[in-house]
Amino acid sequence: MGSRGGGSGAGAGEVRATWWGGDSENSALNAALDALAQETGTKVARETQAWDGYWDRLATQTAGGNAPDLIMQAGSQIPDYAERGTLLDLNTQETLDVEAIDEGLEQFGLVGDQLYGVVAASNAMGLVARDDLVGQAGLSLPGDDYDWEELAQIAVSAHDALGDEIWGLQDGGGDLILFVMKVRDDGRQFYADDGTLNATPEDLTAWLQYWQDLRDAGGAPPADVTAEGQGELPNTALAQGRAAMGFGWTQDYVAYARLSDSSLSLHLPPHVPATPSLWMNAASLWSVSSTSSVPDAAVELINQLTNSTEAIEALGISLGIPPSEAAREQLTGSLSAEEQIAMDYMSTVAEVSTPLNRLWPAGFDELRTLLGDLNEAVAFGDLSIPDAVDQFFTTATDFT
């Protein structure tokens, strides 16, 4: 954990704020809060931590009645925190001023009619390609209308052309977001409106078999290569130049581009126009603790982080794409080439996406971790696909 400005020992009138992130996010948020302190005099005690460990620490603080005033939240976590009464309903705060935020993003902070989070940044999933490897393979990527089978054919062709130590597509079989997209591509929502699974065992069987077939054909790396890259982007097959393509969020594209000496491009994932799989996603949200002693100041800080030109300039797209048109217009022309590509990509996504039918229900994060583990076990030959499917749906049933 890193802390700056007092950690949990905030002074009288200070706002305690916590967020997850690495150097880029910490630097940008500290710069934004410093700028706001100069402009408004608001002092903020800051508690930062990497994603790993962030939720355990926040859960401990919340259980102990010592939650920070301003909390960076994830859409998947808000229903649980809201259900336990630990977040302030922001709809009750008359001074909240976040009308600039894109209308389609508001849902990520809503639980029923109560607003428990304001989107801090948005993102969307994309297909990242190393232009050098794709070019060497003599391939071209499809435009905006292609399916998963076409992607598999391209991935296998890339491996055939580039040799035994380079694969076409980074293994995405353990990525629950991609599985959600595949189910939406097939014309259904992943979750029913009541939070039960719409996805079926047949869906998951086909999904895990798709990736096993890709690994067998060289379209995706073998299990040991994928395992070497777990945890950090610089270690992934895509960043290492051992895969020509891989999936990632828009901010991941920017990070990959900064790591690579090759030109990278960002494309739509497999896309069926009649049943769009993509959605505009909330990369992070700002919430206020229900036990905050300075709720008005915390709400005002949300206003400033959303609307202040100084804060928008300091944040750039370090947290993801700004969630308001005004912020995006302000940043246009000041971004690096890869940042501008990421922001332009979001405009494309806005035209071809459809919103999720509901927020992620309780258990989503557990299923996300579980699918990664199951896909890895299948890839190593330690688990059959039928057994993996049984484990996934047995666990999912426990949450309904």
Image (spheres, rainbow, N blue to C red):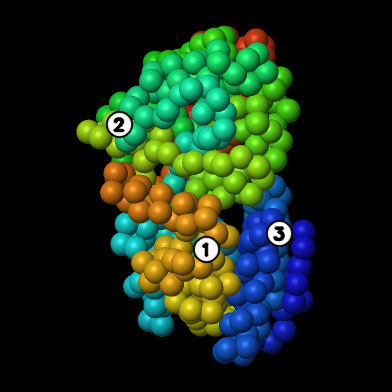
Q: Which residue is mark 1?
A: 335
Quarter of the image where one finds residue 377: top right
The numbered dot on residue 23 is: 3
The numbered dot on residue 145 is: 2
Q: Position of residue 190 (x, y in %)?
A: 37, 33
Marker count (numbered): 3
Query: Could you tell me the amino acid type at mark 2?
Result: Asp
User: Going by the image, does 63 lie left or right of 399?
Assistant: right
Residue 92 vs residue 159, the one in the foreground: 159
Residue 60 at least partly seen: no
Name the N-terminal-most of marks 1 and 3.
3
- At label 3, counting other C-alpha atoms closer than 10 Å, the crowd grade (few under 14, some 14-19, many 20 or more) is few
Q: Are marks 2 and 3 in contact (CB under 8 Å)?
A: no
- At label 2, counting other C-alpha atoms closer than 10 Å, the crowd grade (few under 14, some 14-19, many 20 or more) is few
Residue at image point 51% right, 15% down: 156
Query: Could you tell me the amino acid type at mark 1?
Result: Leu
User: Would you place residue 59 above or below residue 133 in this image?
Assistant: below
Residue 358 vs residue 119, the one in the foreground: 119
Q: CA distance from mark 1 to mark 2?
A: 29 Å
Quarter of the image where one finds residue 63: bottom right
Residue at image point 38% right, 20% down: 150
Quarter of the image where one finds residue 356: top left
Mark whose residue sits in front, 1 or 3? 1
User: Would you place residue 47 above or below residue 123 in this image?
Assistant: below
Name the N-terminal-most of marks 1 and 2.
2
Q: CA distance from mark 2 to mark 3?
A: 37 Å
